Amino acid sequence: MNEINQLMAEIRAFADARKWEVFHTPKNLSMAVAGEAGELVAEFQWLTARESERSELSAEKLIDIEMEIADVAMYLLRLADVLNIDLSEAVRKKLAINESRF
């Protein structure tokens, strides 16, 4: 099992243990991805491009950003799992499309 599939299984087990399946519809999960992406964006709001570089971020700010990235990733992985989408394959397909476009 690759690491992405392992993470999906861990997230699924976490949700199953809490009986969250009823809430984890594709609509709700996609909205959660958007919400968490907004929280990630908020971490960078009003920073200059230079201030947003890793070397310029405080340790606390970097942890906050890491946690928001994790939230986005977990909801995205859960959405792919609920829809039975092979995320690795989907990314490879999109890269191939982008390769021909750009």
Image (cartoon, rainbow, N blue to C red):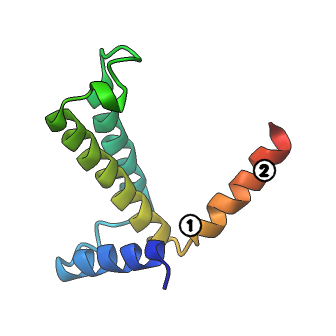
Q: Secondary structure at mark 2?
A: helix
Instruction: Tell me the quarter of the image containing the C terminus.
Output: top right
Secondary structure under the numbered disc 1 in the rendered image:
helix
Can you identify the residue that label 1 sits on? Answer: 87
**1 or 2: tag closer to the N-terminus:** 1
Where residue 52 is drawn, which disc sits there? none
- Percent of width and height locating residue 15: 25, 74
Residue 73 lies left or right of residue 60; in this view the side is: right
Q: Position of residue 12 (x, y in %)?
A: 33, 77
Q: Name which residue type carries label 1.
A: Leu
Q: Quadrant of residue 7?
A: bottom left
The residue positioned 64% from the left and 63% from the top of the image is: 90
Q: Are marks 1 and 2 in contact (CB under 8 Å)?
A: no
Residue most toward the right?
Answer: 100
Quarter of the rendering containing residue 26: bottom left
Say what amino acid the circle numbered 2 marks. Ile
Query: Where 52 falls versus 79 (above or below)?
Result: above
Crowd class of label 1 (few under 14; some 14 to 19; many from 20; radius 10 Å) = some
Which residue: 21% across, 78% down? 19
Position in image of residue 29 (x %, y %): 38, 58
In the orientation shown, which residue stands out farthest toward the front?
Answer: 55
Q: What is the x, y in percent for residue 100?
A: 85, 45
**Residue hosting label 2:** 97
Residue under the point 33% across and 67% down: 24
Tag count: 2
Question: Relative to the observer, which residue lies in front, 52 or 84?
Answer: 52
Q: With respect to residue 76, does 37 lie above or below?
A: above
Nearest to the observer: residue 61 or residue 8: 61
The alpha-carbon separation of the residues under discs 1 and 2 comes to: 15 Å
